[in-house]
Image: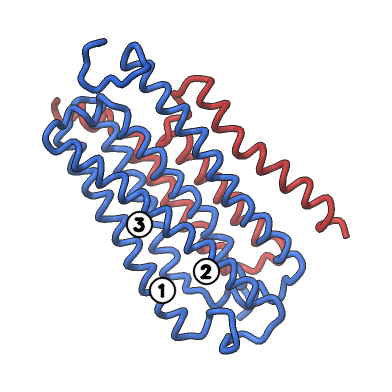
Chain colours: A red, B blue
Amino acid sequence: MDKRQLWQICRLPVFTWLGLCALLAATCTLAFVPMGARNLPVSLCIAAMKAALVGAVFMQLRENNALNRLAASAGPIWLFIMFLLVGADYFTR
Amino acid sequence: MTDSPFLRPPWENLARQHQAVALGMWIFLVSEILLFGGLFTGYAVYRHLYPEGFAAASAHTNIVYGTVNTAILMTSSLIIALAGVFARARLHRLAWYFLLATVALGVTFLVVKGFEYREDIENHLVPGPEFAIQVQGAALFFSFYWIMTGVHAVHVTGGLAAITRLLVASREEPRWLSGSGSEEATALYWHLVDVIWIVLYPLLYLGGRTHG
């Protein structure tokens, strides 16, 4: 395998890592910008984007079969239901 | 295919074995997400009940250590992902060294965390009679901080043990890395440890930074 072929197979993970670094720099900088109640949602949105990048590329969900994607989606779905039911009490008081 | 030395019962061929390993690992990872999900939910409720205490307390965590460790863990995720890419391309020796580099980064993460813990203890950030921040709810934030980062560090240690096992097992027979499915399963676990930290980072390090 020559250098060009090597770069070909490494390219996507490396670009994904660069994206993760850019998002880390953005979220760290935005933490010092006064946005009131929006600071937390913004930082959590960036965290979700980073988690999605790791899941899609590094954990290969992008190219995986439907069964693995279904199993993986159970995590966020049950987490969402737990937040929804707990939030229905605490966050509406 | 069927007489591969890496094939384990009850699977008929390696392709099926790999599918089963990945699916089984994903089901385990989802149970891990729900373990941390309980902590995230508790954190959300108490942060809602004590917004001032949580803001005051999170300004006391060390954002430099937190950010450096995020970068270290994200980089380790890239390195182990590349180890998988190399293993699948039959570049087993290169894959082996990338796994070794992942262990080095994981250990670095734990060392940085250790320095951070020492500073936290010196600054009286352990909830108890000596606790430094006199705002209601601040001690609760630090209870979550210690438990979440502690449970996460246990996961990092478990991941390091799993990668070390890969390194030992594949030392004599590097083809084992692409054959057995163990590399794939271990990498999935390591990426989840990274994802959990990606979520912990804004919860523990980024709050309360805008109040002077």
For the N terminus of chain B, give its image quadrant: top left
Residue that appears at 59% across and 38% down: A75
Q: Are marks 1 and 2 on the same chain?
A: yes
Residue A60, given in percent of the width and then of the height, sits at 42, 30
The chain under label 2 reads: B
The residue that disc 1 covers is B116
Dot 1 or dot 2, earlier in sequence = 1
* For discs 1 and 2, the disc positioned in front in the rendered view: 2
Question: Alpha carbon of mark 3 to alpha carbon of mark 1: how far?
Answer: 15 Å
Callout 2 crowding tier (Cα within 10 Å): few <14, some 14–19, many ≥20: some
Question: Alpha carbon of mark 1 to alpha carbon of mark 2: how far?
Answer: 11 Å
Dot 3 or dot 1, earlier in sequence = 3
The residue type indicated by label 3 comes to Ile
Q: Are marks 3 and 1 on the same chain?
A: yes
Residue B6, given in percent of the width and then of the height, sits at 24, 23
Residue that appears at 29% across and 45% down: B163
Looking at the image, which is closer to me, A5 or A68?
A68
Whether residue B205 is visible here, answered yes or no, is no
Callout 1 crowding tier (Cα within 10 Å): few <14, some 14–19, many ≥20: some
The residue that disc 3 covers is B72
- Indicate left or right for B191 with B135 as reference: left
The vertical placement of B183 against B154, above or below, is above
